[in-house]
């Protein structure tokens, strides 16, 4: 059974930092591309970042570029999101999400349960 | 970045109704369009991918169509468990943008 379990969320002051982790199990982690997607309270979904299976291709949403860093450790079956210079508008549930690619298709097929990040003084 | 615009933002419908949600991309995305369903307090789940392919285990009352810039999600006969928020998402560009969501509520 595929499982994605996020951790590391919490309350942080504006300007602070936080590191989210996602522990993956039930599949061959190093074969899959991964994403972070967030959802502010009562709002819609926002894609945050993508990392290729080997970690050498990375993309970010403009809203987090230069402040957030995605990484992975395939030996530990883990995905990470280092978040610096946090702002109130970064308050959201952060989901770890797995990509599934095929012929002319690319979708997110598994999501974690999410971890809440609250940026407030 | 590619912008995704859904309409309507919300709708009220009754059990048994046919429901249609539209999604428009700001530029052509071929068929790289996915639909997700999200219920309160839960993570999203994929319903349709590649614009029209039903994800395994998803009831056949859900269907998707379209290509290029205009797409549609249809629920042929609404059931109580379908009351949720629906999101389209493009996966044509690396920045996988979502639509703003359509909340389907009980009339």
Image (cartoon, coloured by chain):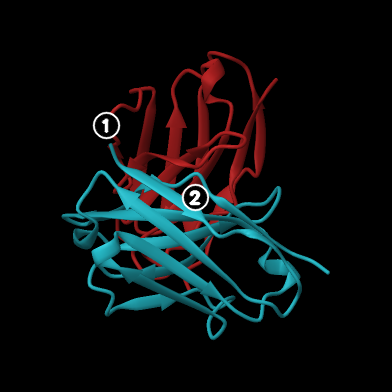
- Residue position marked by numbered label 1 in the rendering: B56
What is the drawing colour of chain B? red
Question: Tag 1 or tag 2, which sits nearer the N-term?
Answer: 2
Q: Residue at x 27, y 80 (%)?
A: A56
Q: Residue A23 at what x, y percent from top left?
A: 38, 54
Of circles 2 and 1, which is in front? 1
Left or right relative to B19: residue B49: left
Q: Nearer the viewer, residue B102 or A27?
A: A27
The C terminus of chain A lies in quadrant: bottom right
| Pointer 2 chain | B
Q: Residue at x 47, y 18 (%)?
A: B77
Please tell me whether mark 2 sits on a helix, a strand or a loop. Answer: strand
- Residue position marked by numbered label 2 in the rendering: B23
Q: Residue A10 at what x, y percent from top left?
A: 66, 59
Hey, which residue is sitting farthest bottom in the picture?
A66
Q: Residue at x 51, y 22 (%)?
A: B18
Q: Nearer the viewer, residue B43 or B85?
A: B43
Please tell me whether mark 1 sits on a helix, a strand or a loop. Answer: loop
Q: Is residue B17 visible?
A: no
The N terminus of chain A lies in quadrant: top left
Letter of the chain shown cyan in the rendering: A
Q: Is residue A112 visible?
A: yes
């Amino acid at each position: 059974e595929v499982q994605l379990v996020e951790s590391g969320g919490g309350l942080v002051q504006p300007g602070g930092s936080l590191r989210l982790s996602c522990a993956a199990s039930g599949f061959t982690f190093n074969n899959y591309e991964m994403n972070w997607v967030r959802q502010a309270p009562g709002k819609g979904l926002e894609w945050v970042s993508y990392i290729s299976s080997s970690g050498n291709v990375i993309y970010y949403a403009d809203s987090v570029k230069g402040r957030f860093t995605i990484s992975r450790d395939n030996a530990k079956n883990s995905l990470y999101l280092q978040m610096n210079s946090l702002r109130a508008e970064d308050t959201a549930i952060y989901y770890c999400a797995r990509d599934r690619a095929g012929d002319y298709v690319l979708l997110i097929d598994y999501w974690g349960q999410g971890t809440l990040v609250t940026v407030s003084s | 970045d590619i912008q995704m615009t859904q309409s309507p933002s919300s709708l009220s419908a009754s059990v048994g109704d046919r429901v249609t949600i539209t999604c428009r991309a700001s530029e052509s995305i071929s068929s790289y369009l996915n639909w997700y369903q999200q219920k309160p307090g839960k993570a999203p789940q994929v319903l349709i991918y590649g614009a029209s392919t039903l994800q395994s285990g998803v009831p056949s009352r859900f269907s998707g169509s379209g290509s290029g810039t205009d797409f549609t999600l249809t629920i042929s006969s609404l059931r109580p468990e379908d009351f949720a928020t629906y999101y389209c998402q493009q996966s044509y560009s690396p920045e996988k943008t979502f639509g703003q969501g359509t909340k389907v509520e009980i009339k």
